Image: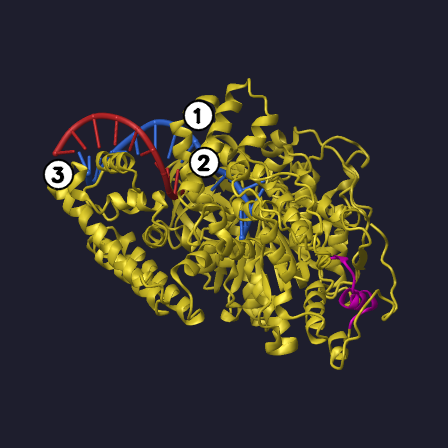
Chain colours: A yellow, B blue, C red
Amino acid sequence: MTEAPLIVPGSAGPRTSGAEGQDELLAGLNPQQLEAVTYRGPALLIVAGAGSGKTSVLTRRIASLLRSREAWPSQILAITFTNKAAGEMRERVEGLIGDAARGMWISTFHSACVRILRREAQQFGYTKSFTIYDSGDSRALLKRLVKEHEADAYGLTPASVQSRISKLKNELSDAESYARQANMSDPAERVFVEVFADYQRQLQKANAFDFDDLIGQTVYLFRAFPQVADTYRRRFRHILVDEYQDTNHAQYALIHELTRPVSGAGAAPDPYASNGMMIFEPDPAPAADAGEPGASLTVVGDSDQSIYAFRGADIRNISEFERDFPGARVVLLEQNYRSTQNILSAANAVIGNNFDRKDKKLWSDKGDGDPIIGFTGYSQHDEAQFVADEVEALHRAGMPYSEMAVFYRTNSQSRALEEIFIRSAVPYKIMGGTKFYDRAEIKDALAYLVAVANPADEMSVRRILNKPRRGIGDVTETAIARFAEEHGISFRDALSMPAQLGVGPKIQAAIGQLDAVLTEATAILIPASGELPPSTAVADGLSLLLGKSGYLDALRASRDPQDEARVENLDEFVAVARDFARNNPEGTIVDFLTEVALVSDADDLDDESGSVSLMTMHTAKGLEYDAVFVTGVEEDLIPHRISAGEPGGPQEERRLFYVGITRARKRLHLSLAMTRAQFGEVTVAMPSRFLQEIPSGLIDWRQSPGDVNSRGGMQSRALNARRQGGFGGSSSGSGDRFAVKALPGRDSLKPLSTAMDKFPNRVTAKMRDNGDLELAAGDRIRHVDFGEGRVDAVTGEGAKRIAHVRFDSAGQKKLLIKVAPIEKI
DNA sequence: CCCAGCAGATATTTT
DNA sequence: ATCTGCTGGG
């Protein structure tokens, strides 16, 4: 990449002079930002470090294009990473220039592709009411196929097949093209190809796309139907892509297709080229009508924040941008307007350990700010308590809850935090994670809607077949499927002829009733004559389906206490549908299902709600908060254990950690726990190597790993037995709190160990080494926080012995004997 | 066909 | 620890 060209405003390439009003759009920008907003040319790469104001630059660039009349809103396509980011960008552009912004496409890759596919689906064997399969749906389908093909005999699991298919689709590969280059003498490969091909057939039959197809099939569409592609090439004159470092090959290809010159292709394409599969490396269509040049492309990215390699993000898309788009201008934004210098110094020190990156140092003129706070808990609950306490302290000091966020590496870590937050009455909300739409009852409700919207989607019809219980079991289901097969009708249509299925009268009645409900709902949701249904149709249809199917009644009649919550969830879902109607008066059931499929919980825009946000570090990308808590900063968590074996894994984890800490404006807290429960097992955790990469002077440990660690007694000897080793630490000396002096040369190439022996003897009054404490049922103990109690039982062995204690006032607890602050009395 | 009880897998990150 | 899927008795 080139270095940042220092540009004098006005010297930039061909540009239309923005009329009056441009000045305010440009106010307060630094020279690089100004260049990024005003440069006009075919291709622009904005390398934007964390917090360098790229969103502001992007929105102003769009506003500037619109205000100067260089573009109509409809000529702009802006791609963001999440729907939430899209919504925010739209709001900000509208804030700058008002209603003149209406008509722009600002959306994610997936949403944009769905819009295109819905319009063009008929071109290649789909209908516009196609279903979108989420990961769970495709997993379910693959589960069936793996079984049918007996692929498990070759070591294939639904999960592994799913991930392989996804990776291939991200490379625009399909079963056929994969088979051409695979070793087909390997039976496992053959059966994989079979499953892959069958999977694709089933999707097509169900009139469904999976997430990856949304991108890949759009690329296919553009390549197979140049005149369709031309429509969009003519339309979108300015394409802007945010988070470009996280685009995968399919997304890259899509952008490439869209930015080609209009081909003016008149040649009739073969609509069934390659049997409905994707086409590869097509010859560039000749520019017949010497028409429009390709759209202008602006991409924004930061290779230090590339954290989606696992789903095919290819960092080369950004690093080779100039090669791909000759004549591209590159602008570097390095001044950070978000964080204090302490936070940035820590971030720089950490990311500096990635060896294959271009050096880039963020700087801030905000001053040092507060030190980073470190804390080491005995357990994840202890850690969570620290976070909750600190949140409360900050709140009392005047910081709104909505300005605080807690990050973790894996979704499962949110549990402990939730428990403690509830107990501490800290208002919080979880972004992403186990989603509302993942609950069984919501999926059931969705399946009812899909059964109406897209009856070809057999999976959905099968799902609701016996929900609620109608006495329809495996035997009946197979009978229906066979009848449909024999008569060449769909599974759904077979339901309308219960008498011919050869099943008992009771079951016939049940099927007939289900068919009637679906038919009635169809009349509401999809009026025959083609007139638009009323905006309340979706909510009405949903209520009808849930009511007349007996689904709600069955839940209400149940005495399982969980079912009460399920009814509430369904009520909420109906409320979601009503909300949708209010926001989208013209919205159809298909629009509703699309939104549900693509808009995750994290996209909810109600940040005003005054709660602390909990999310994974991945979800945190693009967001910022006054105070940030990064939790679970432990080896095997961040960097995650599984990443260790993957090429580039640890480096990606480092970037992820970097993303986490650069979200903070004023206060950053790094915390970890010495023990963590996973799979019901308590494991001993070690501080993350990344902690040592932060200069010690920047972290103010409330309780350091050394404090919590035992004083090297027998307990930790086993752990110490691990080879200790140094590793090119950050140029800024690693902390003496971490006793780096005791380590061998830092240029040692040995794998880094974070064995606790790095954390010296800093025994505090609070810490104990209970390694040899013998406890038995009936013993009485005293706990620092919980007071006195009686041991009910002791389970586990050695370092993992757990005391089950009934405290006199604090109730029942399980304690890891080795580290719990307890004593026998 | 339904249910209870048990065995086994399962959690990295996301659209 | 929790969820899913299987199995055997109703």
Instruction: Tell me the number on the disc at residue A504.
Output: 3
| Cα distance in 3D space between marks 2 and 1 | 15 Å
Q: Secondary structure at mark 2?
A: helix
Q: Are marks 2 and 1 on the same chain?
A: yes
Q: Viewer-nearest of labels 2 and 1?
A: 2
- The residue tagged 2 is A199
Q: To which quarter of the image does residue B6 belong?
A: top left
Mark found first going from the N terminus, 1 or 3: 1
Q: Are marks 3 and 2 on the same chain?
A: yes
Range of residues picked out in magenta: A29-49
- The residue tagged 1 is A152
Residue A379 in view here: no
The answer to whether residue A60 is left or right of residue A779 is: right
Q: Secondary structure at mark 1?
A: helix
Residue A391 lies within the magenta run = no
Residue closest to the eye, A662 or A778: A662
Residue closest to the eye, A612 or A795: A612
Q: Check contact, mark 3 vs mark 2: CB within 8 A.
A: no
Q: Residues within 10 Å of mark 2 (few under 14, many from 20)?
A: many
Residue A536, percent from left and from top: 34, 69
Quarter containing the C terminus of chain A: top left
Q: To which quarter of the image does residue A145 belong?
A: top left
| Cα distance in 3D space between marks 3 and 2 | 33 Å
* Tag 2: amino acid: Tyr
Residue A37 lies within the magenta run = yes
Q: Residue at x 84, y 66 (%)?
A: A12
